[in-house]
Image (cartoon, rainbow, N blue to C red):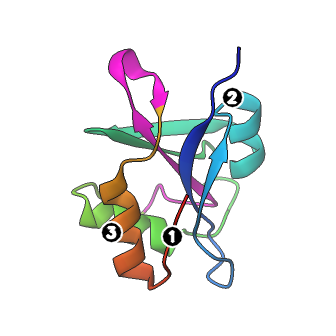
Amino acid sequence: MSTTCIALIVPDQLNRPVRVESLEPSLENLQLLVGGDVESVARGDWHVYFNSVGKISNLPPNLRASQLTHECGLDLADAARGTAVFLGQAEHGAEADVPAHLVRRATELFGTPLAA
C-alpha cells in the first residue's frame, strides 16, 4: 500500500520555482528528486532530504533551502546542495505532510504563494 504526502520541493536553481506537490515518499522517488542517494536532516516536526554526496559531487549550493533551514533554527549552509525535499515527520520517524509553518515561511521568504 502506498502513501502520499505533501512535500515542499526547493530546487537549487534560482530560476526554477519552489513548489508544493503530492508525492509518494519512496526511496526511489526521493532519489529521483535529489539526483542520487539521499541523506536526511531532522528538526522537530519536519526533515529535509538532500543528495548525500552533493558537496563532493560539486552540486550547486541551494541558497533558498539554506535560508529556509536557517530561519527555522538549523544551519545547513554547507550541506544544502542540489534540490531539497522537505517533508513532515510523524510518529516513529514516518513520513508526513510538510508542516504548514514551513510552507508559510517559504512563501514569505521567496515571495511565491505555495499551495498543495
Q: Amino acid at mark 1?
A: Leu
Residue at 36% across, 38% down = 42
- Per the model, the C-alpha gap separating discs 3 and 1 is 10 Å
Circle 2 is placed at which residue position? 26
Q: Nearer the viewer, residue 11 or 113?
A: 113
Which residue occupies the extreme left position in the image?
Answer: 73
Q: Amino acid at mark 3?
A: Arg
Residue 20, placed above or below residue 3: below
Q: Which stretch did the figure color magenta?
A: 78-95
Question: Horizontal placement of 100 versus 86: left or right?
Answer: left
Magenta run includes residue 86: yes
Circle on res. 114? 1
Question: Horizontal placement of 75 versus 13: left or right?
Answer: left
Neighbor class of circle 1 (other Cα within 10 Å; few <14, some 14-19, many 20+) is: some
Residue 37 on image: x %, y %: 69, 37
Can you say which quadrant of the picture contains the N terminus? Answer: top right
Residue 113 on image: x %, y %: 48, 77
- Do we see residue 76 in this rendering? no
Mark found first going from the N terminus, 3 or 1: 3
Q: Amino acid at mark 2?
A: Ser
- Do we see residue 39 in this rendering? yes
Secondary element at tag 3: helix
Mark found first going from the N terminus, 2 or 1: 2
Neighbor class of circle 2 (other Cα within 10 Å; few <14, some 14-19, many 20+) is: few
- Per the model, the C-alpha gap separating discs 2 and 3 is 26 Å
- Per the model, the C-alpha gap separating discs 2 and 1 is 23 Å
Circle 3 is placed at which residue position? 105
Secondary element at tag 1: loop
- Viewer-nearest of labels 3 and 1? 1
Circle on res. 45? none
